[in-house]
């Protein structure tokens, strides 16, 4: 990628916001350098201190960290815990034709609101929007558990998503504000561990709660966890108070929401609700394209744009957004189909299916901790996304060999390799994005990273779902032609497939379906392989910018004005 992208995006970096530091229960913040780039002289550090940048001591960070981790756990669990309960939900509420919207409504609402939480937190202070996100999320959770119809559940899941959009972004941006860049890798590795625990534990917990209690409790369980996070963060989290007047970019935010909505609906409806060449899908694509052009025009002229285009002039930031998009496209798109393979070909129950992913979690935890510690010691990071991309490509090649006779031990080893790559890659993407912007754009960097990942994941599920469905249907049709009367009459659209369908088939037909599923899974991972190679190639072009450490204020610099901010 050359310099033309960020040159065309236009805009100047401008001056940092006028911010007053604050101190609270966690102690007195220490001034630190805030602008992106390498290590600074003492004079530059003093100038950064004037701009309002601050850090907390390691002890103070560890006091705040549990609340941030609880918020991340809350957001991650709710994305993963619902899937195992969907059959029971349909059994109680009906509305099977609208089942996908239980997930889509949540994803759409959270994706659309993610940039708002990031930008508004930058403008008016992070804590108030963090707290608001948790409150909205908890209200949506309680209402979801009380739903009496599918329409109500979809509506309340959308409310949940409106709050969830702020949980992950606020947590990541808060780390960006209170931790010097050089030390962030260590704390982000803790977040990566929590995310992987949620990835494995979410389906397990969802299955257990649904079977032992009721599907309604997969929503009620959020209340004590979220309540604890809310109380803890109110008590311990104290961030700078913004003292500047702002003009909110309502038009830009609306257009960005329209673009995100269009992309997700195209990915959701294309090939399932409507054919890819239908008037509905093509019309939606045209509207989305027009909204994107209008968004770029508005943002280039807005006083305080929702997604400032000047951040894309930074080479590392633009490359990082490309990285996170392709990671979402390939990794999350392909991972969608692993539970289907496990619950059919490998004969695992939904609970065991979650346990089978434990090796991936272990591999990811190992490399994320190693990468975090090494970044803190050396201040350098480029090696990790390069190695992570390479390992991810190797893992996709190995997973492309999953077949009918692949043992759980072999597939577990493949998952370990994938986890090793994820651990080197995932946290570094956030770290590089945050290090590429000024403090005043920290929320923008975090929200942009989440936004591009979610958009990539939505497109990946649609694209690889279509590929999986095509290969599976083709394999079943070929088997039926080779042995008339023996092939099962199953058709898959957009990758939607219920494992329960397979268990009800005769043995001979089941073997045909197992072979077809394996054929489809192999095609998906071979399709993801170029995406993984692209991640590796993009990472090679990252510029190594030494991460800033904890800066000492210059003696001649007057101490910044302090306000107690709750």
Image (cartoon, rainbow, N blue to C red):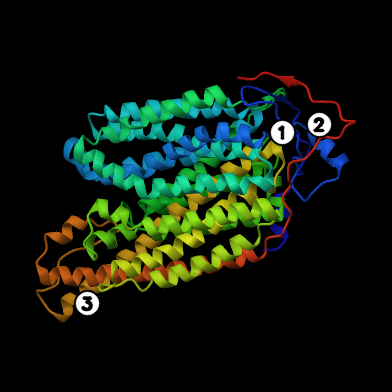
Label 2 vs 3, first from the N-terminus = 2
Answer with left or right where residue 339 lies relative to residue 454: left
Question: Looking at this view, is 236 or 131 the one in front?
Answer: 236
Q: Is residue 527 above or below residue 290?
A: below
* x and y, in percent, of residue 153 in the image: 29, 33
Q: CA distance from mark 1 to mark 3?
A: 64 Å
Label 1 vs 3, first from the N-terminus = 1
Residue hosting label 3 = 478
* Residue 494 is at least partly visible in this image: no
Residue, far right: 556
* Residue 552 is at least partly visible in this image: yes
The residue depicted at 80 percent of the width and 37 percent of the height is: 552
* x and y, in percent, of residue 152 in the image: 29, 30
Question: Which tag is nearer the camera, tag 1 or tag 3?
Answer: 1
Residue hosting label 2 = 50
Residue hosting label 1 = 54
Quick one: SS at disc 2?
Answer: helix
């Amino acid at each position: 990628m050359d310099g033309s992208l960020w040159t065309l995006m236009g805009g100047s970096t401008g001056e940092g916001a006028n911010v007053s530091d604050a101190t609270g229960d966690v102690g007195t913040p220490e001034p630190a350098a805030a602008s992106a780039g390498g290590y600074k002289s003492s004079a530059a550090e003093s100038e950064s201190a004037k701009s309002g940048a601050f850090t907390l001591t390691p002890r103070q960070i560890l006091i705040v960290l549990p609340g941030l981790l609880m918020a991340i756990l809350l957001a991650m669990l709710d994305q993963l815990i619902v899937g195992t309960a969907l059959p029971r939900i349909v059994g109680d509420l009906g509305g099977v034709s609208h089942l996908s919207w239980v997930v889509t409504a949540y994803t759409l609402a959270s994706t659309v609101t993610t940039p708002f939480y990031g930008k508004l937190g930058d403008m008016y202070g992070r804590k108030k929007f963090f707290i608001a996100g948790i409150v909205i999320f908890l209200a949506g959770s309680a209402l979801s558990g009380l739903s009496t119809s599918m329409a109500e559940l979809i509506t309340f899941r959308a409310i949940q998503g409106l709050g969830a959009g702020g949980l992950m972004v606020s947590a990541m941006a808060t780390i960006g504000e209170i931790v010097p860049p050089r030390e962030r890798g260590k704390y982000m590795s803790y977040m990566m561990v929590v995310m992987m625990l949620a990835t494995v534990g979410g389906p397990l917990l969802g299955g257990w709660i649904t079977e032992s209690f009721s599907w309604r409790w997969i929503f009620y369980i959020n209340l004590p966890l979220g309540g604890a996070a809310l109380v803890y963060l109110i008590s311990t989290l104290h961030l700078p108070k913004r003292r500047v007047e702002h003009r909110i970019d309502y038009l830009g935010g609306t257009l960005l929401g329209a673009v995100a909505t269009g992309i997700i609906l195209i990915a959701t409806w294309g090939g399932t609700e409507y054919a890819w060449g239908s008037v509905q899908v093509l019309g939606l694509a045209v509207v989305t394209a027009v909204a994107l052009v209008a968004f770029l025009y508005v943002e280039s002229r807005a006083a305080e744009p929702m997604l400032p285009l000047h951040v894309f002039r930074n080479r590392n930031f633009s490359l990082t957004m490309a990285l996170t998009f392709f990671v979402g496209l390939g990794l999350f798109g392909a991972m969608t189909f692993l539970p289907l393979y496990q619950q059919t070909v490998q004969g695992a129950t939904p609970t065991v299916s979650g346990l089978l992913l434990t090796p991936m979690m272990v591999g990811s935890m190992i490399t994320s901790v190693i990468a975090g510690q090494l970044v803190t010691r050396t201040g350098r990071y480029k090696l990790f996304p390069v190695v992570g991309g390479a390992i991810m490509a190797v893992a996709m090649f190995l997973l492309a060999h999953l077949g009918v006779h692949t043992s759980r031990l072999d597939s577990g080893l493949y998952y370990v390799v994938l986890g090793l790559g994820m651990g080197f890659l995932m946290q570094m993407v956030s770290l590089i994005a945050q290090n590429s912007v000024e403090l005043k754009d920290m929320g923008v960097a975090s929200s942009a990273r989440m936004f591009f990942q979610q958009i990539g994941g939505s497109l990946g599920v649609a694209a690889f779902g279509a590929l999986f469905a095509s290969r599976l249907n083709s394999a079943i049709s070929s088997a039926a032609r080779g042995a008339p009367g023996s092939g099962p009459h199953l058709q898959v659209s957009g990758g939607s497939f219920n494992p329960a369908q397979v268990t009800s088939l005769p043995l001979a037909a089941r073997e045909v379906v197992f072979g077809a599923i394996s054929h489809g899974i192999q095609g998906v991972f071979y399709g993801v392989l170029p995406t993984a190679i692209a991640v590796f190639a993009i990472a090679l072009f990252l510029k190594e910018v030494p991460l800033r450490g904890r800066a000492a204020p210059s003696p001649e610099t007057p101490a910044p004005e302090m306000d107690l901010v709750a």
